[in-house]
Image (tube, coloured by chain):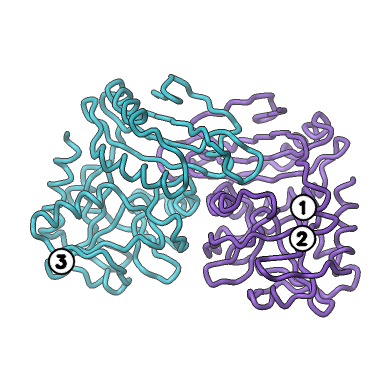
Chain colours: A cyan, B purple
Amino acid sequence: MLSWIDGQPAELLSVQDRGLAYGDGLFETIAITAGQPSLLERHLARLSEGCARLHIPLDLPLLRAELLAFSRQLGDGVAKLILTRGDGLRGYAPPQPAQPRRLLLGNPKPSYPAAHAAQGVRLFPCATRLAEQPVLAGLKHLNRLEQVLARGEWRDAEHAEGLMLDGAGRVIEGVYSNLFIARGGVLITADLSRCGVAGVMRAELLAQAVALGIECQVRDISYAELLAADEVFLCNSLYGVWPVRSLLTHDWPLGPLTRKLQVIARDLLDC
Amino acid sequence: MLSWIDGQPAELLSVQDRGLAYGDGLFETIAITAGQPSLLERHLARLSEGCARLHIPLDLPLLRAELLAFSRQLGDGVAKLILTRGDGLRGYAPPQPAQPRRLLLGNPKPSYPAAHAAQGVRLFPCATRLAEQPVLAGLKHLNRLEQVLARGEWRDAEHAEGLMLDGAGRVIEGVYSNLFIARGGVLITADLSRCGVAGVMRAELLAQAVALGIECQVRDISYAELLAADEVFLCNSLYGVWPVRSLLTHDWPLGPLTRKLQVIARDLLDC
């Protein structure tokens, strides 16, 4: 596994890193094709927003240069970028100034069954709910126990992803994907101001759909509205778009909006 | 710094550890005096409960033996025990079986001003709220961004601790302490079934107070009830008990129940 810490090859980390102690940091999972990162500007923008909200200093030009060099060396695969607040294990108080640590970990692209994209997937109904925490909502931070517990709820291969609701029962996202529904030609995805991860593929698909003249809404989605949708699909920055075909006893057809967005996502990831 | 990983001296950790990737683990902060850990059984009991709830396998006899050996070597100080789910960076799914990793980090005891215990402390009113997440509530897990953000809200030495409320405005705890109020001779501490960390000192003080015939209640506490309390104090497993004397414009006296519990805590930490 290709692994860099602060720009140097390294596979071991200080036990005093606050990323370990408190999950005090952020990450991005970036598809790399022929040495080039996909959706680079959106990944860096989300990381920058996370750093601003968590008050972690960020040297963006340095990080960008390192990520580009790492991507060239990786060639094809997935780059996981982790930015922690750096060392400081004695108490929660953030060090002033913090010395953030940059990790880059390379892996092969995950090999999902081709049928997930072609025919669609079945959702597992996760019992683990997403807590409402506006100060962390939207960020891809390192506090991910909710996703770990949710993903641990099923092991069979029949379910490719899990559906996560918030405490009030609103439809938020998948465990490692964002979720869209289509209804009457309108594309709808959950408001992520209380919980959830604002995925870069979600942001890009919203922008491209608007540019194509498709009406888009970002707002609360009830469970009833999910079931009543014409189409449902998932997206993330690695696999693109997967149609959702079933959840418990409910089935959805594979529709035209899903296919249209899937083509867009595929083009973005074949950079 | 004394530092062990899986029973061996080591200061560097695999970058693939899920403690870093997802905060997928638990920790305990244990006072060590003359080579002996204080409140050992309560620390191990909380860790065991955390492992059961997060489905992390735990070799308790091994962990206990390692902690005791580490404590003898440390002599006097604070042992931070971190148990992670071990390696596995590719996706949220918990590895089956997991190979948990045990970290033990030794540090000197923190040197708090003697006045904190003697005269009491001033609370900072944290704007960061605790999210309601019943599946994680009570545990001392590694997802601690709420505490990091709350502790980052003040830097002056005038405030020794911060008050944390939940999303509904209920009084829950300090950033690194539990909170008790006394009213009409009754000791009250917050119900931690929705959020908060169930501290081992809190548990021990409750048990000892009951044994002394003091009526104890574990239930919701409103902000108005906090202000109306006869006495307020904080506790944790390192400093014991600190009287709380003020919050914004409100003052509390230093009362007899606080002093009684403070003596008990001091005895527990002078083991």
Image location (x, y in percent) of residue A15: 60, 31
Label tally: 3
Query: Is A230 left or right of A146, judged from the image as shown?
Result: left
The answer for how far apart the CA atoms under marks 2 and 1 are is 8 Å
Image location (x, y in percent) of residue A150: 45, 55
Q: At 39% from the left edge and 34% from the top edge, which residue is drawn?
A: A81
Which corner quadrant of the image does residue A88 belong to? top right
Query: Label 2 sits on what residue type?
Result: Ala
Image location (x, y in percent) of residue A218: 26, 64
Callout 2: 10 Å neighbours few (<14), some, many (20+)? Answer: few
Q: Are marks 2 and 1 in contact (CB under 8 Å)?
A: yes
Q: Which residue is mark 1?
A: B42
Residue A187, relative to residue A198: is it above or below?
below
Q: Which residue is mark 2?
A: B203
- In the image, B186 versus B81, the foreground residue is B186
**Chain on which label 3 sits:** A
- Can you say which quadrant of the picture contains the C terminus of chain A? top left
Earlier residue among tags 2 and 1: 1
- Can you say which quadrant of the picture contains the N terminus of chain A? top left
Callout 3: 10 Å neighbours few (<14), some, many (20+)? Answer: some
Query: Label 3 sits on what residue type?
Result: Val
Q: Which residue is mark 3?
A: A186
Q: Does any portion of residue B98 appear in the rendered image?
A: no
- In the image, B115 versus B208, the foreground residue is B115
SS category of the residue bearing label 3: strand
Q: At 76% from the left edge and 63% from the top edge, which residue is drawn?
A: B244
SS category of the residue bearing label 2: helix
Q: Are marks 3 and 2 in contact (CB under 8 Å)?
A: no
**Chain on which label 2 sits:** B
Say which of marks 3 and 1 sits in front.
3
Image location (x, y in percent) of residue A32: 26, 31
